[in-house]
Image (tube, grey):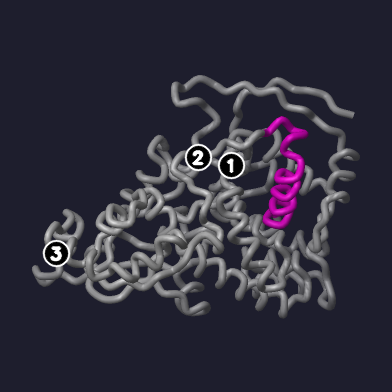
């Protein structure tokens, strides 16, 4: 049975979920003024989100400050439960009070944010699905990027975790050997971050032999999950058997994951239609892009003009770069497949153009180095 509710945009009540104010799931769902924008990335962010005031989402209000009213269908628990059982998934999707509560969050309380999330799936999911399938692990893991970053490679958490998959500096550099330099950060690289997320999930699954426990460990760490298993009596345990022994954020992480899967499958039934953001492009899929090594110094602007690629596309494909500039040396950048070979062949031509007409950002970069300042200063 379904009934309808007319509701104005309302704030998410953290107490009803048992979350603390600094929990990452809550931060992603709340106003994104809580998320820090790295000063180095403001140029790239402005290109990709020309009309945005925050890095991920608007609030539950229009830009004019008027409250948003919506017609919301309310379904009985039995209908939600039946729908979950119909979803084809290699990861068990259990219906209970926790998962129902998170489904309510996405389909009732944060509908506008859910619309924006759905609007980003056509751009990132095909790319992520391709690599998950290639690695032989569940494609449902793509939904982790929704919980972690709402599929925004520029998202930065309070703890400094960054990128689509939200790796901390310590995990990325020390555990996964990802490169973090003043020039670029692999945590924001579409390919590198996804490749290492897959690597980490495989490692976690080898420890727990259970995907829901591996997902919980991705959030809270394997040590936290092992401790919860011991407190629950040890032996082979399911996530639900140890949930009450986990920290609040990790305890809510798996129900939120299941709720996002439900949202993706049944958005239409809840009258939730995608909102597609400006500045996005549908060629992120590996079949449409290619990495090419180019010699610098070379600005994105020069590459953009010479190859006929918009700066928005350049930045969208290369969010890992802290500035739109390749210093002296060799660097890999992602380009539309049909432009990659041209860029490689005409690298020297572009270098000559850059020398004759250096961009402001290139001149600033060179000046700072000549002044005896380290590259690290530019990252501050």
x 83%, y 64%: residue: 241
The total number of labels drawn is 3
x 66%, y 71%: residue: 134
Q: Give, as a single range, the part of the protein colored magenta.
A: 252-272
| Image quarter (top left, top right, bottom left or bottom right) of the N terminus | top right
**Whether residue 33 can be seen here:** no
SS class of the residue under badge 2?
Answer: loop
Asked whether, in this view, residue 296 is left or right of residue 341, the answer is left
SS class of the residue under badge 3?
Answer: helix
| Image quarter (top left, top right, bottom left or bottom right) of the C terminus | bottom left
Q: Is residue 260 magenta?
A: yes
The residue wearing badge 3 is: 355
Place residue 264 in its image quadrant.
top right
The residue wearing badge 1 is: 119
Residue 274 placement (x, y as % from top left): 62, 37
Residue 352 placement (x, y as % from top left): 17, 66
- Which circle marks residue 99 in the picture? none
**Whether residue 3 can be seen here:** yes
Whole-Å distance between the Cαs marked 3 and 2?
Answer: 36 Å
The residue nearer to you, when weighing 262 against 218, is 262
Q: Is residue 218 magenta?
A: no
Residue 282 placement (x, y as % from top left): 53, 50
**Are dots 3 and 1 in contact, CB under 8 Å?**
no
**Are dots 2 and 1 in contact, CB under 8 Å?**
yes
Disc 3 crowd rating (10 Å Cα; few below 14, some 14-19, many 20+) is: few
């Amino acid at each position: 049975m379904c009934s309808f509710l007319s509701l104005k945009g309302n704030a998410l009540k953290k107490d009803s979920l048992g979350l603390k104010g600094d929990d990452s799931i809550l931060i992603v769902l709340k106003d994104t003024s809580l998320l820090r924008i790295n000063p180095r990335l403001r140029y790239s962010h402005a290109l990709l989100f020309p009309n945005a005031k925050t890095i991920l989402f608007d609030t539950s209000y229009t830009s004019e400050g008027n409250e948003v009213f919506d017609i919301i269908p309310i379904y009985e628990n039995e209908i939600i439960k039946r729908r979950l059982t119909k979803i084809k998934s290699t990861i068990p999707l259990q219906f209970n009070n926790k998962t129902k509560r998170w489904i309510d969050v996405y389909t009732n309380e944060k509908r506008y944010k859910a619309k924006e999330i759905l609007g980003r799936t056509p751009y990132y999911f095909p790319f992520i699905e391709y690599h998950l399938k290639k690695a032989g692990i569940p494609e449902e893991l793509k939904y982790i990027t929704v919980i972690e970053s709402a599929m925004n490679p520029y998202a930065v958490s309070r703890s400094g975790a960054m990128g689509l998959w939200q790796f901390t500096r310590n995990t990325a550099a020390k555990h996964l050997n990802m490169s973090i330099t003043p020039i670029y950060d692999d945590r924001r690289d579409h390919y590198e971050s996804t490749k290492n997320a897959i690597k980490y999930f495989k490692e976690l699954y080898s420890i727990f032999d259970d995907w829901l426990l591996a997902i919980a460990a991705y959030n809270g760490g394997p040590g936290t999950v092992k401790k919860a298993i011991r407190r629950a009596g040890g032996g082979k345990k399911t996530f639900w058997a140890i949930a009450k022994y986990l920290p609040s954020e990790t305890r809510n992480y798996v129900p939120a994951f299941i709720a996002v899967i439900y949202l993706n499958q049944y958005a239409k039934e809840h009258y939730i239609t995608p909102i597609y953001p400006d500045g996005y492009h549908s060629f992120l899929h590996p079949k449409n892009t290619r990495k090419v090594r180019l010699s610098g110094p070379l600005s994105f602007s020069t590459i953009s003009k010479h190859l006929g690629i918009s700066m928005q596309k350049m930045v969208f494909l290369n969010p890992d770069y802290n500035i739109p500039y390749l210093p002296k040396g060799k660097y890999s950048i992602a380009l539309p497949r049909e432009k990659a070979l041209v860029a490689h062949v005409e690298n020297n031509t572009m270098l000559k153009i850059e020398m004759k007409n250096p961009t402001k950002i290139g001149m600033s970069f060179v000046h700072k180095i000549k002044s005896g300042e380290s590259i690290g200063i530019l990252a501050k």
